[in-house]
Structures are given as structure tokens and as C-alpha cells.
């Protein structure tokens, strides 16, 4: 399954992890030096949320930012009780 937000279209982006060695000049050293650069990916913070679309309830994978913005309409809480509990 692709790591893509269904509402905002956020997807993983490329980046680098930079390895440094040495002591910074501020701390009394001769300065830091880059010793290696390796590729990495930054993933979006995806959540699986129940939402209402076209009158139907379904699960969607959306980013946490989309939830905070209010782009997701969550279904209302269930108020009715099951028949077995109602009789007893």
C-alpha cells in the first residue's frame, strides 16, 4: 500500500542523513567535518481514520495534518443498543 494521504496527497520525500565528526569550534574544537552522506526518506504521519463519504462510512489513510485541519468528517457515534442488550 502506497504511503500517500488520500486528501492532501502528501507522500514520502527524499533527503540525506549527514554524518559528522569532530568537535565544534564553539566548544573548543577545530570544527566538525562531514564524513558520509547516506540517502533516506521522510514519511508522512499517516493515520487510518473512519470517515463519511457519499453517505457511506469507510476507512481512509490521511495525514495527521489533514485531521487537524478538519478535512475529515467523522461519522456520528452510535446511539442505539443491540437487540440482545435491550431485552435483558
Image: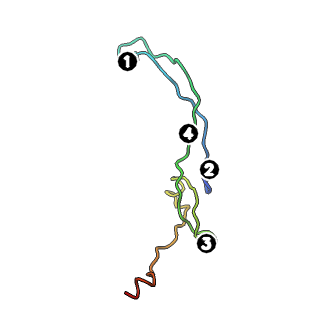
Q: What separation in Å lies between label 2 and label 4 (alpha carbons)?
A: 12 Å
Q: Which sits earlier in the primary sequence, circle 3 or circle 1?
A: 1
The residue beneath circle 4 is: 42
The residue beneath circle 3 is: 56
- The tag on residue 4 is 2
The kind of secondary structure element at disc 3 is strand
> Could you say where residue 73 lies in the image, as x and y percent from the top left?
54, 66
Q: Which sits earlier in the primary sequence, circle 1 or circle 4?
A: 1
Residue at 42 percent across and 11 percent down: it is: 30
Q: Residues within 10 Å of mark 3 (few under 14, many from 20)?
A: few
Q: Which sits earlier in the primary sequence, circle 2 or circle 4?
A: 2
Q: What separation in Å lies between label 3 and label 1 (alpha carbons)?
A: 60 Å
The kind of secondary structure element at disc 4 is strand
Q: Which sits earlier in the primary sequence, circle 2 or circle 3?
A: 2
The kind of secondary structure element at disc 2 is loop
Between label 3 and label 1, give the one nearer the viewer: 3
Q: Which sits earlier in the primary sequence, circle 2 or circle 1?
A: 2
> Could you say where residue 5 lies in the image, as x and y percent from the top left?
60, 53
Q: Residues within 10 Å of mark 1 (few under 14, many from 20)?
A: few
Q: Is residue 40 above or below residue 49?
A: above
Q: Which sits earlier in the primary sequence, circle 4 or circle 3?
A: 4
- The tag on residue 26 is 1
The kind of secondary structure element at disc 1 is helix
- The quarter of the picture where the C terminus appears is bottom left
The quadrant holding residue 55 is: bottom right
Q: What separation in Å lies between label 2 and label 1 (alpha carbons)?
A: 42 Å
Between label 2 and label 1, give the one nearer the viewer: 2
72 on left or right of 30: right
Q: What separation in Å lies between label 1 and label 4 (alpha carbons)?
A: 30 Å
Residue at 58 percent across and 60 percent down: it is: 60
> Could you say where residue 70 lies in the image, as x and y percent from the top left?
52, 61
* Marks 3 & 1, CB-CB < 8 Å contact: no
Amino acid at each position: 500500500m502506497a504511503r500517500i494521504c488520500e486528501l492532501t496527497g502528501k507522500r514520502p520525500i527524499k533527503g540525506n542523513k549527514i554524518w559528522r565528526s569532530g568537535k565544534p569550534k564553539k566548544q573548543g574544537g577545530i570544527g566538525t567535518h562531514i564524513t558520509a552522506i547516506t540517502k533516506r526518506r521522510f514519511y508522512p504521519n499517516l493515520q487510518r481514520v473512519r470517515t463519511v463519504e457519499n453517505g457511506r462510512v469507510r476507512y481512509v489513510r490521511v495525514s495527521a495534518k489533514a485531521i487537524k485541519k478538519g478535512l475529515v468528517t467523522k461519522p456520528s457515534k452510535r446511539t442505539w443498543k443491540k437487540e440482545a442488550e435491550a431485552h435483558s
